[in-house]
Image (cartoon, coloured by chain):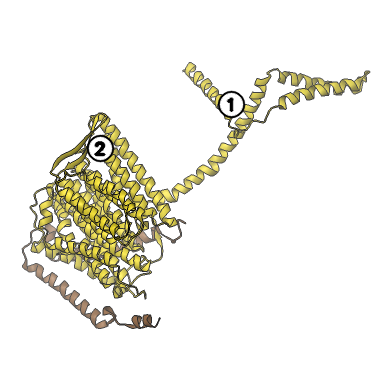
Chain colours: A brown, B yellow
Amino acid sequence: MVKKEIETKKEYFFDKPKNVKGLFRFFYALLLVLLVIEFFIYKHTYFPWEEWPGFYAVFGFLAFVALIFAAKYILRPIVKRKEDYYD
Amino acid sequence: MINPVPPAAIFIIGALLIPLLKGRLKSIYLLLLPIVGFINLINIPEGMHWVVRFLDYELVFGKVDRLSLLFGYIYHLIAFIIILYSLHLKDNAQHVAGFIYAGSSLGVVFAGDLISLYLFWEMMTFSAVVLVWSNKTGKSIAAGFRYLLVHVFGGLCLLAGIVLYVTNTGSIEFGYIGLKDLATFLIFIGFGVNCAWPGLHPWLPDAYPESTITGAVFMWTFTTKTAVYVLARAFPGTEALIWIGTIMTAFPIFFAVIENNLRRVLSYSLINQVGYMVCGIGIGTELSINGTVSHVFCHILYKGLLVMSMGAVMYRTGKINCTDLGGLYKSMPLTSLFCIVGAASISGFPLFSGFVCKSMVLEGAALGGMSIIWFILMFASVGVLEHAGIKVPYYAFFSHDSGIRTREAPLNMLLAMGIAAFLCIFIGVFPGPLYSLLPYHVDFEPYTTFHVVGMSQLLFFGALAYVLFILSGVFPAEIRAINLDADWFYRKAGTAFYRFCNVPLNSFRLKMQGFLSKVVDSVAKLGRDPLFIPELAIRYVHLKIAQILIPVAKPQGAKERLAELEFKLRRIQKISESGREYGADIPRRPIGLGVLLAFVLIFFYLLIYMLF
């Protein structure tokens, strides 16, 4: 038991706010790089909208938002049941 | 050099010897089986092998070409990985069922005729259900029965289709079939049940999460991928498949967002992934078929990896719900790492295997100018990122700390996951070897700068949305609940239908039966002595008249006369009451009811016949 308590008090990587903050900084920097780099590359496209600057970024973001909202506010109220529904 | 044997034979016959072995010898034997199978496989030249005459037909146990070979390779590879993963397992039934399951899948893949294909197809169903039942919980047994019912339905569709098809064409050869008439439609549906098409899919998220930890990896691999194989063989370029596949990619992602059980999340993810494959078959160009087949290869590895990592979590903690897990990276760092590799691969991040295979299907759709399909597939790709790419690793290993401290997964599990993770990255970095095995020549370069940047933007900005949702608290909280799916129709509505049959219909039947029994009874009495009714009536009237008249007239010997009449009436009543009462439950008697019904029906039939 004593050993277990010591273990739970041990600080792990994501327990330190500094590490989490660093990770987020890296993530935001990567997003910025991805947006900027688009203007310097050759685009081999199939559809006209692929040429719009930041199309994939905007699409990815909006699709994610739409997905979450549809699942949370439309699907879940319809299909959610108690865990023992079928028992 | 010994002559090669059918690939299915090594697994299926090999499986039967497993219970005879023990300890280390058994472990070595288990690991050797897929290796021997693989050596056997690479020694089979392309062409038709093992043709056996059966009645008037020729069974072909080895239709070997580039398409079936690639499925053969990956099935052997994943069988080895799963066996390594389940080496700690003592339950022989699961080992035997697993090998028979993998072997019969190989049997389907190399079947050159419809009869042997059907036999192996059914064998898959029955061996797979053992892997669900082996969990030995009430839930798993019930789910196993439902699994069996749905697949027997699919199997019967397939059988009916095959019988019609063989009658129509006279050939049992299994090759391109195409959607033409009722026969081919039934075969199509039979394949579709195993492929978890929308509406036919609920057996998958119902039964798979109830399977055993090691059996799950078999389940997630074989049934759906074998269905993809037969579709690619028999129905390439069928337009309906484009839409079926596209819907398959899109609808499960909504369910996956709100699902609490992580193995059920992976079940929905499986339907979504198979959707890309089905869509590729539907598009039917060389590029998209290549995309489908390479997707099968990569998918089996990364989905196997994800299922294995969740299995390791279950093995150590006994829990699988998002609401119970979290913070496991602290005690299972390697498992977390492997899970992240699987998650990155399935999401299609550059340098991981999903990137080099899924893009082919997307490009196939783009080249065909199918903009709506393309948009839905892209949308579904974001959905994959959400549930398989982020949700599964995040809720199991990070998220809020559940306080669970456990040990790292056992060595054999880590090795199995390690091999799969290595292959996911290797294929992602060097897609060349995989491309060289595909059925058609590959003229596709996944690593163009625009493609890399575009996909990265899509995924990383999707992830940004996730981060913002989590930080703002809008993200749908994980709730201890279940979500209804189409299996409601046979679990709830089916029960209600049963109750409807039992209560109103059955009580009506009982009433009718009672009534008809009485009718038969009186008819039977009449039949025994047709004269007794008039006699009874006469005696009755006689007695009544006597009873009225005798007190008035008061003749001599009136009392004796009355007693005599009563005695006669009672005797006739007694005769009519003798013999047993009629009852439908007495086995001898329903014959009478049957004869009566037949008689009545024939009577009405004759009446109608004569009138019209």
Between residue B385 and residue B82, name the one nearer to us. B82
Instruction: Specify the label residue B592 is tagged with.
Output: 1
Name the side, left or right, on which B290 lies relative to B87. Answer: left
The picture places residue B604, in percent across and down from the top left corner, at 52, 22
Instruction: Specify the label residue B114 is tagged with.
Output: 2
Residue A52 seen in this snapshot? no
Whether label 2 touches label 1, CB < 8 Å: no
Q: Chain of mark 1?
A: B
Q: Secondary structure at mark 1?
A: helix
Between residue B106 and residue B242, name the one nearer to us. B106
Residue B495 seen in this snapshot? yes
Q: Is residue B185 above or below residue B570?
A: below
Mark 1 packing: few (<14 Cα in 10 Å), some, or many (20+)?
A: some
The picture places residue B31, in percent across and down from the top left corner, at 24, 57
The picture places residue B228, in percent across and down from the top left corner, at 23, 48
Q: Is residue B321 above or below residue B20?
A: below
Q: Looking at the image, tell me whether mark 2 or mark 1 is earlier in sequence order.
A: 2
Q: Is residue B371 above or below residue B183?
A: below
Look at 33% across and 63% down and name the residue there.
Answer: B262
Q: Is residue B422 above or below residue B519?
A: below
Q: Secondary structure at mark 2?
A: helix
Residues at marks 2 and 1, CA–CA distance in whole angstroms: 48 Å
Tags 2 and 1 both on a single chain: yes
Mark 2 packing: few (<14 Cα in 10 Å), some, or many (20+)?
A: many
Q: Chain of mark 2?
A: B
Between residue B88 and residue B145, name the one nearer to us. B88
